[in-house]
Structure formats: structure tokens, C-alpha cells
Image: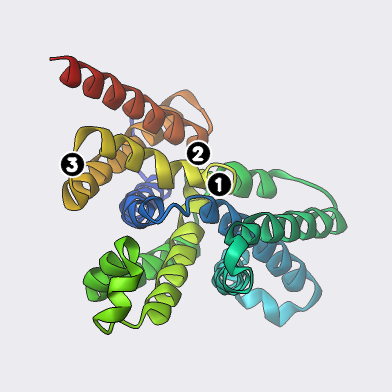
Amino acid sequence: MEGFFDGSLVQRALLTGAMVGLLCPIMGLFLVARRLAAIGEVLAHVNLLGVAVGAMAGSAVPFLASLTPPAYGMAFAVLGAFAVLGLRRAYAQFAELAVPILLAVALGASVVLFRLMGGFGADLAGYLFGNLVAVQSADLQLVAVATALVLGGVALLYKELFAVTFDAEYARVVGIPVRAVENAFIVMMALTISAAVRAVGVLLVSGLMVVPVAAGMLVASGFRRTLVASLAISELSVAIGFALAYGFRLATGGTIVLVALFFLLVAAVYRHLRERG
């Protein structure tokens, strides 16, 4: 562990992890409250499709390489977010159909594109399982932009998001533009997912979105207290998980999520003991 804080590589990883650890529980709490946790999984796979398209476009047309694959992933995630809303509105009585439809499209197309590019190498593994150590300056800048946009959006629309999340009909009655708020929410969700993919990967991103929130709900009551608890658990999970992964050469994404699951177990035990006492 000597030299842990030395070098720009670790600094980039820590900054990225800190921002992701901040975003995920904020958006995750709204997502869980709306019972839409599965949408995070869909947008993560749409992000992967964007990465595949970006990698292929950059190799085929040189000037398209000016944008990194993660930037393409973020753009596709935003487009995918609107596709989710469109499908949910089209299948109003069966809104859950949006998840398997888009998941199948994104995953199937991603597999085909990566195979066309010559197979599944280390780069794909990094996107699937996360690798904070591999974060580049361009990735850090992208995550910083996403963080600024999401935090700014939540600060501006907090009351509206809260109202739409817990009582959309009341929100309409009092004049809140529900559709516009839903559009803003899903875009912020896409940005959050795109940022989190660099930390924990496509396959584990839902874990960092949901597990700290689940733990926070066990130790705190009320929306704001749960948010504070979830933020603390998320940031601790990222910090401890990255330190363990760095020190013992483990996969960063998996280690971070496992630490979050450990906190969930501790929270469950605490809740059980408190209820018994």
C-alpha cells in the first residue's frame, strides 16, 4: 500500500470514484422510490452499445475518433433513456415491457458489434466489470461534466422530482409539468449510469445504484435521512472497495459492490437488533 496516493492514475481513480459514489445513491433513491430499479440495468447495457458503436466508428472513420467510446456510450444512454420513456408510454398498461425489449436490443447489438471488431478483449472486460485504475483524463472530464449536470438538475428540480416520485397525480393538480420532469429525471439517470460504468462496470452498476440505498433505508427514516445514510454508505463502499482492490489486486467493480453488500448486511443486523430491543 506504499505510495497509494502517489501518481495521477490513483488520483483520477479516487476522484472518479468519489463522484460516482455521490451520484449513484442520489439518483438511486429516486429510482427505488419509483420502483424503477431495473431501468438502471437497461441504460447500462445501452451505454455498452454506444461504446461498441464508438469504438467501431472511430476505427472506420478517423475524424469520429475525436470522441472517446465512453462519450458515445453516454450519448447512447441518453437516447436509450428517451426510448425507455417512449416504450413505457406506448405500453401504458404494460410499462414493464420496456425493460426486456431494450435490454435484448442493446445486449444483442453489443455482442454482434464487439464480435465484428475482433472479439472480446480487455477493453470490453473493463466496461463489463469496471476498472477505476484504467480511468483516463478524458473519462474523468466526462464524469465531472455528468456530475455537474446531475447535481445541478437535482438542486433545481428537487421539489418537483420529489412530488412526481411520490404522487404524480397531485403534482399535475398543482401545476407541475410531470412529463418534463420525467424527461429530465431519465436524462439525469442516463448520465449517472454512464459515469458509474467506468467505476463498477455495466454488469454491476445497478448494485451501486440500489445496494447503498437499500442499506440506508434500513438505518434511517424519511427521505432526506435515508439519502444522507445512502450517500455515506456509497462513498465508504467506493473508498474501501478501491483500497482493497488496489492493495490486493482485485477487480475494482466487484470489490466495491461486495463492500456495499457488506454494509447492507450490517444494516440488516442493526435493524433486526433495534427492533428486538
Which percent across, then down, holds residue 144? 37, 65
Q: Quadrant of residue 153?
A: bottom left
According to the image, label 2 marks what residue? Answer: 253
Residue at 49% from the left image edge and 58% from the top image edge? 193
For the residues labelled 1 and 2, say whether their Cβ atoms are less than 8 Å apart. yes
Q: Is residue 5 visible?
A: no
Q: Amino acid at mark 3?
A: Ser
Q: Nearer the viewer, residue 248 or 175?
A: 175
As helix, strand or loop, the secondary structure at mark 2 comes to helix
Residue at 34% from the left image edge and 36% from the top image edge? 237
Side of 198 where 147 appears, left or right: left
Give above or below for 184 relative to 113.
below
According to the image, label 3 marks what residue? Answer: 221
Q: What's the colour scheme? A: rainbow
For the residues labelled 1 and 3, say whether their Cβ atoms are less than 8 Å apart. no
Q: Residues within 10 Å of mark 2 (few under 14, many from 20)?
A: many
As helix, strand or loop, the secondary structure at mark 3 comes to loop
Which percent across, then down, holds residue 44? 57, 55
Which percent across, then down, holds residue 128? 62, 45
Which percent across, then down, holds residue 256? 43, 35
Q: Earlier along the polypeptide chain: callout 1 or callout 2?
A: 1
Q: Which mark is residue 201?
A: 1
Query: Between tags 1 and 3, which lies in front?
Result: 3
The Cα–Cα distance between marks 1 and 3, rounded to whole angstroms, is 30 Å
Q: Amino acid at mark 2?
A: Gly
Residue at 71% from the left image edge and 59% from the top image edge? 101
Q: Earlier along the polypeptide chain: callout 1 or callout 3?
A: 1
Q: Amino acid at mark 1?
A: Gly
